[in-house]
């Protein structure tokens, strides 16, 4: 199966998709940059619009159109959109196998020449590791923008009520004990978004990282030791199944979206959430009252280690995200991205969006306590693993997501789930 076929199959249920309409009057502009994004938080969109307006003012004749798709709709409809006459100039992307598959279809433009122009003027402002994460066959297929880490965030008041010390959770046994104690206190331990599936894959993915360690995980990707059907990955599933057996999530979590999970956490209806570095902001915007938890009521801890297993607490799972440029996009598109990632702009965006830019020197200037904690975890990490549903490619990633939910809900066994993941991985890498 070709890479093009594999990727186009991902989200092929885009039947009935109505192409995004061009809303700006392009007759008065020489150049139109169509910017497709997933952001629905008004303060973030507002600062992005300010940045776009600044670029337009400095570049007469250029118009930047901002176009929005919700996360799940984006994943489903993007393959169709990229083959249509309404193809965007740039769009949100994650590093990993999905980006590589997109590049292999021929719809993207290699931005290496733009990064290296003027004696590497743009390249030298970005962390080399972030550029490497968007590079395949020595070509850079997206402009890296943000680096992130998935961690547990917890409601300090609910933890105190149950007599749980969040700062003392270091091992999986500690975590399971905390879940049981919260349940005994009548508190829902965890907010989960099982309807979207990918939020649950964080659990299986992290447990696999802890059980296998870096070397074991890389060996599995190389097809060694039974691959993803090997002992560490079955053990990861067994621990996830044991967590599911405690019924730790809010009622109805299997049908809940990610935004529903954030609302449960922000409303104080669940004590924890395994989430992104931007949780301090997103739990507010998704809460019922629009206020959410006070920042000083939120704590953070890294995904626990497993005693006796090789994975260490400084091994992180998190995203590397950025903007991909399509092959026929206006040449000004890369110039806009260079401005977007410039230090002053990246700092302004970080302050509003509560994210960790890859622009050199910006992460070190973060003062927000919760976000700073995540930034420090990234600075100290020993291994950065991209989300598995991105890193392993769209089709394997979809199976990982499905199996994670199936394990935690008791719908399948850890052994069967691991074998299905391995079978798909083998099929995709033949």
Image (tube, rainbow, N blue to C red):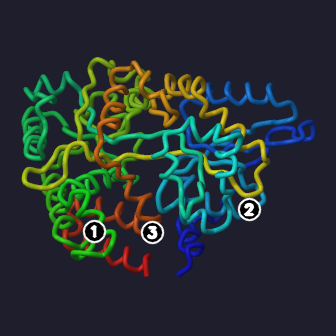
- Kindly check if marks 2 and 3 are in contact, taking CB atoms under 8 A apart as contact: no
Image quarter of residue 29: top right
| Helix, strand or loop under label 2 | loop
**Which label is found at residue 386?**
none
Tell me what residue is drawn at x 47 percent, y 64 percent: 394
Circle on res. 84: 2
From the top left corner, tell me how far across and down residue 246 is, in percent. 13, 50
Q: Name the one closer to the observer, 313 or 14.
A: 313
Circle count: 3
Mark earlier in primary sequence (2, 3): 2
Separation of marks 2 and 3 at Cα, in angstroms: 22 Å
Q: Position of residue 124 (x, y in %)?
A: 57, 38
Left or right, 294 with reference to 390? left
* Front tag of 2 and 1: 1
Disc 2 crowd rating (10 Å Cα; few below 14, some 14-19, many 20+) is few
Q: For the residue carrying disc 1, how many other residues have a C-alpha within 10 Å: few (<14), some (14-19), or many (20+)?
A: some
Residue 428 sits in which quadrant?
A: bottom left
Rendered location of residue 75, percent (x, y): 54, 56
Residue corresponding to mark 3: 395
226 lies above or below 190: below
Q: Compared with residue 40, is residue 194 higher up or lower down, i.e. above or below?
A: below
- Of the numbered discs 3 and 1, the one sitting upstream in the chain is 1
Instruction: Identify the residue at image location x=60%, y=26%.
Output: 345
The C terminus is located in which quarter? bottom left
Label pair 3/1, CB-CB below 8 angstroms: no
The crowding category of the residue bearing disc 3, from other C-alpha atoms within 10 Å (few below 14, some 14 to 19, many at least 20), is: many
Q: Mark 1 points at which residue?
A: 219
Residue in the picture at 92% in, 36% down: 28
């Amino acid at each position: 199966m070709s890479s093009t076929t594999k990727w186009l199959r991902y989200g092929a249920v885009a039947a009935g998709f109505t192409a995004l309409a061009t809303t700006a009057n392009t007759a008065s502009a020489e150049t139109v940059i169509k910017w497709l994004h997933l952001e629905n938080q008004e303060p973030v969109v507002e600062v992005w619009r300010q940045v776009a307006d600044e670029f337009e003012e400095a570049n007469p004749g250029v118009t930047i159109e901002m176009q929005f798709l919700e996360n799940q709709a984006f994943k489903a409809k993007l393959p169709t959109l990229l083959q249509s006459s309404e193809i965007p100039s740039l769009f949100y992307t994650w590093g990993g196998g999905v980006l590589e598959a997109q590049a292999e279809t021929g719809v993207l433009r290699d931005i290496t020449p733009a990064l290296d122009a003027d004696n590497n003027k743009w390249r030298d402002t970005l962390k080399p590791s972030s550029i490497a994460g968007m590079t395949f066959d020595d070509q850079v297929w997206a402009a890296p923008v943000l680096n992130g880490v998935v961690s547990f965030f917890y409601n300090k008041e609910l933890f105190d009520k149950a007599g749980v010390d969040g700062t003392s959770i270091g091992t999986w046994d500690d975590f399971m004990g905390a879940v049981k104690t919260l349940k005994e206190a009548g508190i829902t331990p965890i907010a989960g978004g099982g309807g979207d599936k990918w939020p649950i894959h964080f659990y299986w993915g992290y447990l696999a990282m802890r059980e296998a360690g870096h070397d074991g995980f890389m060996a599995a990707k190389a097809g060694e030791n039974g691959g993803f059907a090997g002992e560490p990955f079955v053990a990861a599933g067994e621990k996830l199944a044991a967590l599911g057996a405690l019924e730790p999530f809010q009622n109805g979590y299997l049908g809940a979206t990610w935004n529903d999970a954030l609302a449960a956490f922000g409303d104080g209806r669940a004590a924890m959430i395994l989430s992104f570095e931007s949780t301090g902001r997103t739990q507010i915007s998704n809460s019922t009252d629009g206020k959410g938890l006070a920042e000083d009521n939120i704590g953070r801890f890294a995904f626990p280690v497993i005693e006796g297993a090789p994975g260490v607490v400084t091994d992180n799972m998190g995203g590397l995200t950025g903007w991909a440029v399509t092959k026929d996009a206006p040449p000004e598109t890369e110039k806009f991205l260079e401005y977007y990632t410039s230090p002053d702009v990246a700092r302004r965006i970080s302050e509003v969006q509560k994210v960790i830019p890859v622009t050199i020197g910006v992460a070190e200037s973060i003062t927000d306590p919760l976000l700073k904690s995540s930034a420090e975890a990234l600075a100290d990490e020993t291994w950065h693993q991209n989300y598995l549903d991105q890193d392993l490619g769209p089709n394997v990633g979809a199976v990982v997501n499905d199996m994670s939910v199936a394990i935690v809900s008791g719908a399948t066994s850890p052994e069967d789930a691991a074998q299905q993941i391995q079978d798909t991985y083998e099929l995709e890498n033949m």
